Image: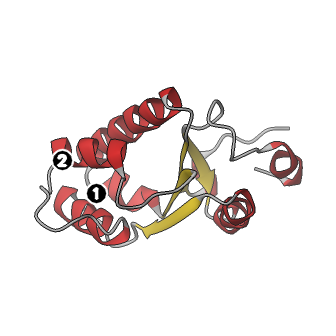
Amino acid sequence: MNDDDDARLDLADPKLAGVYFVTEDDLDTLATATTESRLLLRRLDLQTCHGKSALLQQLAQVLTLPPGQGRNWDALNDQLRDLSWLPANGYVLLFAHAEALRDADEAAFDTLLEILEQASAAWQAQSVAFWVFLALPESDFPTTQ
């Protein structure tokens, strides 16, 4: 992202919402844009998240999942499509250091991406913005001239 991208990014528009890869430097700008758009922001740091169990635990904490709900992929899929305990006009999830999970457990990372994409599509069908930004190292992005 750059300053020009910031001016064009309308987080309140559910048609544009989805799952995106960004750099760590973009997360604070996105957090500010989230606040300005009056969407619910949740931040996760995956620096020490090296597998499914740790990921699901962190998501449960950050999303303040209701007690007694499952901690597995199917439950996460259902929970991200509901979020009735977190009423909002829209949602933004910022994942710092996503490469830690990707590098430690590629299968869990891929499953997470699939669930996040499905959740975003489900919210989009309801005209609710559900954005996900996963921060990866700058070296993961191709350089442009």
Helix, strand or loop for disc 1: helix
Residue 67 drawn at (x, y percent): 16, 68
Task: Give the Cα separation between the discs numbered 2 and 1.
Answer: 22 Å
Bin the neighbour count of mark 1 within 10 Å (Cα to Cα): few under 14, some 14-19, many 20 and up.
some
Q: Can residue 22 be seen from the camera position used here?
A: yes
Where is residue 128, by image quadrant?
A: top right
Helix, strand or loop for disc 2: helix
Q: Which residue is mark 1?
A: 104
Residue 43 drawn at (x, y percent): 49, 67
Where does the C terminus fall, quadrant-wise?
top right
Q: Is residue 44 left or right of residue 79?
A: right
Contact flag, marks 2 and 1 (Cβ < 8 Å): no
Q: Is residue 3 left or right of residue 59?
A: right
Q: Which residue is mark 2?
A: 75
**What residue is at 68 percent from the left and 69 percent from the top?**
28
**What residue is at 44 percent from the left and 57 percent from the top?**
98
**What residue is at 81 percent from the left and 51 percent from the top?**
6
Where is residue 92, by image quadrant?
A: bottom right
Q: Is residue 66 left or right of residue 2?
A: left
Q: Nearer the viewer, residue 90 or 120?
A: 90
Specify which label sits upstream in the sequence, 2 or 1.
2
Q: Nearer the viewer, residue 2 or 30?
A: 30
